[in-house]
Image: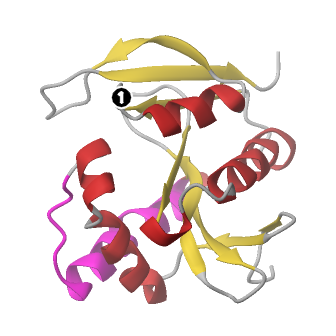
C-alpha cells in the first residue's frame, strides 16, 4: 500500500500516523473545532500521540477505515482530516472532516468528502454511512447535504447535554 490511499484533483489522502500528532493537536484545539465538535482536553503533543494511537490507529486495525490526512498536492501542506469514524451509538460509520483555519472555504473538505464517500461504497462495500453535526454548524451541514446525506433527526451523544443532527445515506440498496 502506498502512502496515499485516495487522490483527488488537488489532494492526496493518507492514513493518519503518530507523526501527525502535531496536526491533530492543532485541529483538536482550534476554536471552531472545540465549538462545533467539542473539547477533547488534549493539550500536549504527547497527549495527541496517545489519542492518535487510541483513536485513528485503532479504527484502522478494527474496521479497516478511519480518518485520512488531507495533503495538498501543490505544496504538501496538511490541510486537515476527512474520513470515516465508528461510534458505538451509531449503527453505521459516520463521515467527518475538520480543516485548519487557513484552508477553510477553499473546497478541500468537499473534494475529500466526495472521495471518502466513493471509497466507502466502492472499496469498503459499506451499505450506509451517517454524519453527525452541531445544528449551528451551517457550513458542515451544507457539505453533508451536498454529499447526499439526508436529515434523520436529533440525537444526544453519551456524555453530552445538547442534541446534534444525525444524517444518513444508503450507499448500496
Tag count in the figure?
Answer: 1
| Residue drawn 84% across the image and 63% down it | 8
Label 1 sits on residue? 89
Image: 64 above or below 153:
below
Residue 135 placement, left or right of 129? left
Determine the residue located farthest toward the top in the rendered image.
Answer: 153
Q: Residue 99 or 126: which is nearer the viewer? A: 99
Residue 30 found in image quarter: bottom left
Q: Where is the C terminus found, in terms of image quarters? A: top right
Q: Secondary structure at mark 1?
A: loop
The region drawn magenta spans 39-62
Image: 95 above or below 151:
below
Q: Is residue 159 magenta?
A: no
Image: 126 above or below 14:
above
- Within 10 Å of disc 1 (Cα), the crowding (few <14, some 14-19, many 20+) is few
Q: Taken as a whole, is the magenta stretch helix, strand or loop?
A: helix
Residue 66 appears in the picture as rendered: no
Amino acid at each position: 500500500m502506498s502512502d496515499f490511499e485516495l487522490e483527488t484533483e488537488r489532494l492526496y489522502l493518507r492514513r493518519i500516523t503518530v507523526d501527525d500528532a502535531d496536526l491533530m493537536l492543532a485541529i483538536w484545539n482550534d476554536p471552531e473545532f472545540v465549538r462545533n465538535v467539542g473539547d477533547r482536553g488534549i493539550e500536549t503533543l504527547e497527549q495527541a500521540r496517545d489519542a492518535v494511537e487510541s483513536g485513528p490507529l485503532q479504527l484502522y486495525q478494527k474496521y479497516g477505515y478511519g480518518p485520512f490526512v488531507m495533503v495538498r498536492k501543490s505544496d504538501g501542506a496538511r490541510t486537515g482530516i476527512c474520513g470515516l469514524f465508528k461510534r458505538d451509538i451509531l449503527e453505521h460509520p459516520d463521515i467527518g472532516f475538520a480543516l485548519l483555519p487557513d484552508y477553510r472555504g477553499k473546497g478541500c473538505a468537499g473534494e475529500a468528502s466526495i472521495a471518502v464517500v466513493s471509497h466507502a461504497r466502492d472499496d469498503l462495500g459499506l451499505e450506509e454511512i451517517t454524519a453527525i453535526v452541531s445544528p449551528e454548524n451551517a457550513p458542515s451541514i451544507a457539505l453533508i447535504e451536498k454529499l447526499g446525506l439526508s436529515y434523520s433527526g436529533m440525537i444526544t451523544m453519551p456524555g453530552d447535554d445538547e442534541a446534534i443532527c444525525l444524517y444518513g445515506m444508503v450507499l448500496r440498496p
